[in-house]
Amino acid sequence: MNKSELIEAVAERAELSKAAVNKAIDALTEVITAVISKGNPVALIGFGTFKSVNRAARTGKNPKTGAVLKIAAKAVPKFSAGAGLKAAVAGKKPAAKKPAAAKKPPPSPPQRRSPPPRRSKPAAAAMSFRGHDKGNPRVALVISAN
């Protein structure tokens, strides 16, 4: 299929004019070319990914003379087919898409709770003998918590 046949097929399927489809295809190829020339990939989920890869410098041979040639390093475009395209070409049914997980509602703000009661340190017991120091025969033991 060449470009004009592609334009006709897309125009029929999308029920658009050939001129509109031609503009869309031209714009698509221009955008993909501009993006991958900057080194960024273009991923069309289910169809494939267009990207730029760097080829290392290497040596080759001139088939006519057998002379060794140095081939410079360069960036080249690469297309990797997606799962949907691979399945369609192989004649298999494409894998069923997993249903999107339901979004969880955002967490509600924390409820203000009253602070737990303060725990006081164990009281140090103080013992004293009242009246002992005054020579009083009636001595009382007093235990108080501070």
Image (cartoon, rainbow, N blue to C red):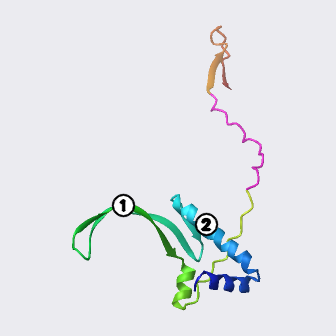
Reply above or below: 8 against 82: below
Could you tell me the amino acid type at mark 1? Ala
Report if residue 114 lies within the magenta region.
yes
Q: Within 10 Å of the Cα at label 2, are there few (<14), some (14-19), or many (20+) other Cα atoms? A: few
Task: Check disc 2 and report its element: helix, strand or loop.
Answer: helix
Reply above or below: 36 against 6: above
In the drawing, does residue 75 fall left or right of residue 31?
Answer: left
Task: Write the residue at 63% across / 19% down.
Answer: 128
In the drawing, does residue 89 fall left or right of residue 119?
Answer: left
Mark 2 vs 1: CB contact within 8 A: no
Reply above or below: 52 against 111: below
Distance from Cα at disc 2 to Cα at disc 1: 25 Å
Q: Position of residue 73 (x, y in %)?
A: 36, 61
Seen as rendered, the residue at the extreme bottom is 91
- In terms of depth relative to the viewer, which is nearer, 142 or 88? 88
- In terms of depth relative to the viewer, which is nearer, 128 or 16? 16
Q: Which residues are magenta?
A: 107-123
The answer to which of marks 2 and 1 sits earlier in the sequence is 2
Task: Check disc 1 and report its element: helix, strand or loop.
Answer: loop
- In terms of depth relative to the viewer, which is nearer, 89 or 83? 89
Q: Within 10 Å of the Cα at label 1, are there few (<14), some (14-19), or many (20+) other Cα atoms? A: few
Could you tell me the amino acid type at mark 2? Glu
Name the mark on residue 132.
none
Which quadrant does the C terminus fall into? Answer: top right
Residue 118: image quadrant is top right
- In terms of depth relative to the viewer, which is nearer, 122 or 8? 8
Which quadrant does the N terminus fall into? Answer: bottom right
Name the mark on residue 73.
1
Seen as rendered, the residue at the extreme front is 65
* Residue that carries the numbered disc 2 in the rendered image: 30
